Amino acid sequence: MTQTMKVIGIGDDGQQSLLPLYRSWIEESELLVGGERHLSFFPEYAGEKRVLKGGLTALVEELRSETRKTVILASGDPMFYGIGSLLAKKLNVEIYPHHSSIQLAFAKMGEAWQDAALLSVHGRSIKGLAQRIDGKEKVALLTDAQNSPATIAGYLLSFGMTEYDAFVAENLGSDEEKTGWYTLDEMADGVFSDLNVVILKKRRESLVWPFGIADEEFSQRKPDKGLITKKEVRILSIAQLQLHAKSIMWDIGTCTGSVAIEAARIAREGEVYGVEKNADDLENCRQNMAKFRTDLTVVHARAPHGLDQFPDPDAVFIGGSGGELRELLNICCTRLRPNGRIVVNAATIETLYEATQAFAAEGFETSVTLAQLSRSKPILSLTRFEALNPIYIITAWAKKVEEEKGGDSK
């Protein structure tokens, strides 16, 4: 029968960071597992040492049949972005945490941390960080060698996030410990230890963009402005997509990116993908992404080309197509995730007919809203209304299985 394994958090000061009881457990164990740095803290260890490298899957399988007294070492709190949660699901373990690096960093900073947003780019892509932290007062980031403080600073500066200053805590608890405040420009030029924590604090005001950004705020094609989903239609269309915080969305024919950008500010922890055939429009889209702090993935292609690069979506918006609507809707319907929605904006009755027929052939339900909107416009001392182009907002979703069986699922 396998032994209950102990997962012990350890600090950068090695054995000194451990309670005497924890040290005795390590001394009495027969197998000690951990990273090379952790194992180096115990040069006199009498049992077998096993270096933890790469993925945990193989190690977990090995440990399933282990009968010896085993201790697994982990940095700080194993349950905070650490290996503890996975080990607890797969093995019979007891968790004994040390202080997390975040906790230690805030202590050095001299500030409370219960109100901070806690995020990690350690072993993860930095993609999407901009919209996740925009507007937050205090953000703590776990980093790695690739996503270093300098890299993070350069990334944030590309989105104009100069309202933040950064507190960098290096080698916490060790003899090489170093902490200090930096502007983002200073941090971008700095060199830091690989073992660090970055805390961003908002010290200056920044622009706030509520839902329903004015059309004129977006960079658009010149001189023929107007290739944008108008604010009122944009709001109605996004409402039909039923986005949530972690939604994966496609914006096909993204143009200026107005729909994708507003969607990304709702799905802050999700992913938004855009495809656009016009290179000039795509450049405008990238400028708008930087202005509105949304880190989308956009590709230069004529849909349906490019869609095979994207993960399956929870929501799809189609603001325009180049005549391949039937093929495009087949792909979208096939790849749409359960309970997902597709919204098509159509300016003509021909496109409305083609879309509704295509959805019916795919077994999708549809609902259509005709948006006939006008905006007030001054004329001398009076006010008149100027009509926007009427738009059909077509919303589609897959039929439920019980509906196809006549409503009885028993």
Image: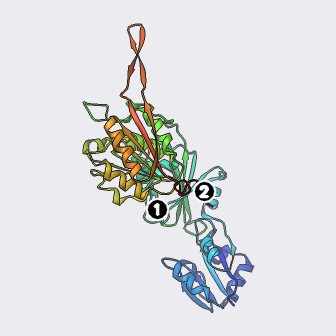
In contact (CB < 8 Å): disc 2 and disc 1:
no
Circle 2 or circle 1, nearest the eye: 2
* Res. 298 visible in picture: no
Locate residue 217: give its quadrant.
top left
Q: Residue under label 2, please give it.
A: 408
The amino acid type of the residue labelled 1 equals Phe
Q: Is residue 76 above or below residue 347?
A: below
Way the structure is coloured: rainbow
Q: Going from the N terminus, do you reach mark 2 or mark 1 first?
A: 1
Which sits in the foreground, 256 or 387? 387
Residue 192, numbered circle = 1
Q: Name the foreground residue: 395 vs 286.
A: 395
Picture coordinates of residue 100, whole percent (x, y): 63, 65
Horizontal side, residue 210 vs residue 160: left or right: right
* The C terminus sits in image quarter: bottom right
The secondary structure type at the circle numbered 1 is: loop
Please, which residue is most extreme toward the right here?
A: 21
Q: Quadrant of residue 151?
A: bottom left
Residue 370 visible in the shown view:
yes
Q: Which residue is drawn at 25% across and 44% down?
A: 278
Q: Where is residue 373 in the image (x, y as percent from the top left)?
A: 43, 26
Q: Residues within 10 Å of mark 2 (few under 14, many from 20)?
A: few
Nearest to the observer: residue 101 or residue 239: 239
Left or right for 258, reference 70 = left
Number of marks in picture: 2
Q: Is mark 2 on a helix, strand or loop?
A: loop
**Residue drawn at the location 65% of the way across and 51% of the way down:** 111
Tell me which amino acid carries mark 2: Asp
The relative height of residue 225 versus residue 24 in the rendered view (above or below) is: above
Q: Position of residue 24 (x, y in %)?
A: 72, 84
